[in-house]
């Protein structure tokens, strides 16, 4: 290789000219994408009146006591909307402001606590539902835009990229797998739209990671394909039924493997098995390491949870398990995942809920 380099450098005639590759450039404007999506992003209000005779809390920083404000996305032509569950949980009245400034009463069809999503219905849709894109096709570096109502400012658009995909084990919700973006997300953006450059919904903005409580460039959105499955289930039956086997599970890490003398190099460590659960009936034990589910490797506890959920309630799933130096196969009949009342704030304060909820 060194000789070849010397020979090239010693040529007397210059090399032929070649056009340099043209780097991809960002569009000069995303106004068309915003124009397609923005009419479907509305303001949502949740009002809590408190118990009869209970004195309302004093106003704070100009806020109206008991009133939460955020964003919602119209996802169907007949008035179905999706928003963040924490905005409307416990609300005595819910209102949605449509583009002509009217506030319409909204019916709460249901809240899916594991994803912190709520589905609403209004009788008079202000227009067609937003087009839904393909979050599975996103790549880190793709341009995305957030549309919402931060600090009460209507139809605010922020610009960023996809920072990462499949973010899990954050303790924000039971079921995660978020799109991470650096598009500015602030209070009031919750429940709003994350769109691609064609104006299609790719996520519902749900949370930020911040010491200040305001945007610091790390925000999370629920992928639109998961959102639409929740919408369909709640619109049809009022809740989402998911598979469950009744274990606490943790991603196997070197320190954990060394502590418990686990020989499996990677997988999901079973930290507990609930009595009388499907896992207990199948013979799973605390200390087992699950390395595959349904014939597919599972390397993280979120991946195992997704496999169990996909099996559905009343289905079955075959697990490949290491128990010490022995390899076993367990066929587990899935049950119905119990509902939980943990709020997002409680999960952040107590990361142990992540393990307790299990799979």
Image (tube, grey):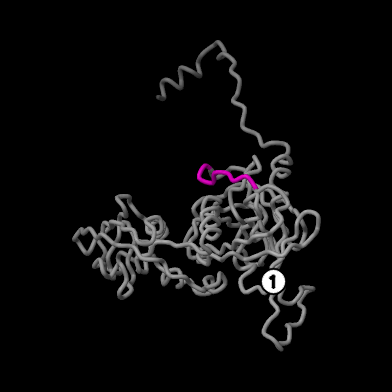
- In the rendered image, the quadrant that contains the C terminus is bottom left
Q: Nearer the viewer, residue 309 or 287?
A: 309
Question: Helix, strand or loop at disc 1?
Answer: strand
Residue 350 is situated, as x and y percent measured from the top left of the image, at: 50, 74
Q: Is residue 341 above or below residue 116?
A: below
Can see residue 109? yes
Q: Is residue 179 above or below residue 273?
A: above
Q: Is residue 207 above or below residue 52?
A: above
Q: Is residue 29 left or right of residue 233?
A: right
Q: Is residue 346 left or right of residue 73?
A: left
Residue 82 is situated, as x and y percent measured from the top left of the image, at: 61, 58
- Span colored in magenta: 130-137
Residue designated by label 1 = 93
Q: Is residue 286 left or right of residue 175?
A: left
Q: Is residue 178 left or right of residue 82?
A: left
Residue 340 is situated, as x and y percent measured from the top left of the image, at: 48, 72
Can see residue 208? no
Q: Nearer the viewer, residue 110 or 261?
A: 110
Residue at (51% x, 50% y) in the render = 165
Q: Residues within 10 Å of mark 1 (few under 14, many from 20)?
A: some
Question: Residue lying farthest left?
Answer: 326
Q: Is residue 133 magenta?
A: yes
Question: Residue lying farthest top?
Answer: 13
Q: Quadrant of residue 31?
A: top right
Residue 89 is situated, as x and y percent measured from the top left of the image, at: 61, 71
Residue at (71% x, 89% y) in the render = 53
Question: Residue lying farthest bottom?
Answer: 53
Q: Is residue 331 above or below residue 12?
A: below
Q: Is residue 241 magenta?
A: no
- In the rendered image, the quadrant that contains the N terminus is top left
Q: Quadrant of residue 198?
A: top right
């Amino acid at each position: 290789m060194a000789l070849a380099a010397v020979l090239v450098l010693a040529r007397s005639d210059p090399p032929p000219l070649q056009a340099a590759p043209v780097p991809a450039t960002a569009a000069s404007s995303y106004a068309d994408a915003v124009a397609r999506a923005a009419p479907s992003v509305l303001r949502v209000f949740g009002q809590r009146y408190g118990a009869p005779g209970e004195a309302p809390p004093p106003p704070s920083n100009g806020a109206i006591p008991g009133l939460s404000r955020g964003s919602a996305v119209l996802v169907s032509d007949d008035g179905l909307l999706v928003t963040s569950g924490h905005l409307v949980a416990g609300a005595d009245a819910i209102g949605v402001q449509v583009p002509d400034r009217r506030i319409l009463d909204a019916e709460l069809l249901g809240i899916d606590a594991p994803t912190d999503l709520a589905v609403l219905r209004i009788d008079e849709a202000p227009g067609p539902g937003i087009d839904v894109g393909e979050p599975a096709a996103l790549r880190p570096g793709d341009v995305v835009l957030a549309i919402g109502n931060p600090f009460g400012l209507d139809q605010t658009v922020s610009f960023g990229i996809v920072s990462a995909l499949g973010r899990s084990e954050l303790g924000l919700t039971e079921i995660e797998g978020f799109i991470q973006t650096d598009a500015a997300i602030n209070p009031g953006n919750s429940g709003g739209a994350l769109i691609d450059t064609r104006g299609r919904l790719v996520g519902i903005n749900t949370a930020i990671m911040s010491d200040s409580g305001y945007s610091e460039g790390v925000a999370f959105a629920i992928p639109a394909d998961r959102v639409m499955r929740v919408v369909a289930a709640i619109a049809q039956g009022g809740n989402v039924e998911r598979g469950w086997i009744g274990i606490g599970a943790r991603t196997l890490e070197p320190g954990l493997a060394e502590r418990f003398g686990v020989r499996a190099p990677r997988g999901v460590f079973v930290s507990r098995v609930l009595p009388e659960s499907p896992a207990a009936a199948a013979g799973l034990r605390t200390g087992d390491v699950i390395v595959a589910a349904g014939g597919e490797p599972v390397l993280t506890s979120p991946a195992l949870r997704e496999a169990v959920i996909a099996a559905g309630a009343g289905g079955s799933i075959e697990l490949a398990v290491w128990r010490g130096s022995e390899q076993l196969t367990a066929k587990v009949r899935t049950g119905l995942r119990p509902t939980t009342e943990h709020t997002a704030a409680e999960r952040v304060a107590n990361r142990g809920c992540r393990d307790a909820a299990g799979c």
